[in-house]
Amino acid sequence: MQKSQTDNDLTQPSNPEPLNLNGVAQKNTFAANVQSLGLNQIQRHVFLCADQTKPKCCSKKAGLEAWEYLKKRLQELKLDQSTEAQPSLIFRTKANCLRVCAQGPIMVVYPDGVWYRNVTPEAIERIIKEHLIGNKVVEEYAFLIHPLPEIVPSCEKDFPEIVQAELPHQHSANPDVEIGLEQGTGQ
């Protein structure tokens, strides 16, 4: 399998094709990017507050140092790509701001919902080994644990006017298939 590109920068398609009038080349490029990133094989997604426009939780230097370390270690350990022996992968995203704005850099691991503070390279090494590989939260740096629910409940019953006005269609994983929302079902 092709090595996963997990910098989340889709401005440069991994398989550039010219845009044509019917959009087929654009859909093929999109599908190639999704495939090369291994999006359907993500086990965990790590967000790290780094390279902030207005650094508040830590210095820009500390945030970028943490980001570079996370990126390097996931690559070295081949956790950012799927292999035959390890079909799932860990995705990483550099977030401009996670809005905690203190004791940073801040990191959150999903779907576990574990929020970490002061994630220096030393802390990141422990989080990788103990949490991402060993499935054990690193209590010393964790300040909140709020896992995502297994099934995300529909907000349609609470905000029907927003759902109907702004979200008239739900899209399937296949870009050629569109699923209409049935009023009142939340599906």
Image (spheres, helix red, strand yellow):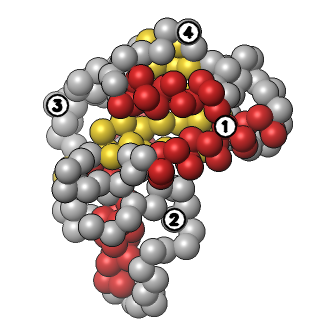
Question: What's the residue at 81%, 40% (across, down)?
Answer: 61
Q: Which marked residue is nearer to the observer: mark 1 or mark 2?
A: 1
Alpha-carbon neighbours of circle 3 within 10 Å: few (<14), some, or many (≥20)?
Answer: few
Label 2 packing within 10 angstroms: few (<14), some (14-19), many (20+): few
Separation of marks 1 and 3 at Cα, in angstroms: 44 Å
How far apart in space, not on screen, are marks 2 and 3 (Cα)? 34 Å
Query: Is residue 78 or residue 141 the one in the foreground?
Result: 78
Q: Is residue 6 visible?
A: yes
Q: Quadrant of residue 96?
A: top right
Image-based side of 94 in relation to 78, left or right: right
C-alpha distance separating marks 1 and 2? 22 Å
Q: Which residue is mark 3?
A: 185
Q: Name the residue rendered at 56%, 48% in the picture.
A: 71
The answer to whether mark 3 and mark 4 are in CB contact below 8 A is no
Q: Give me the residue at 33% from left, 69% from top.
A: 2
The residue singled out by tag 1 in the image is 66
In the drawing, what numbered circle is on residue 124?
none
Q: Which residue is mark 4?
A: 140
N-term mark: 3 or 4: 4
Whether residue 148 appears in this view of the structure is: no
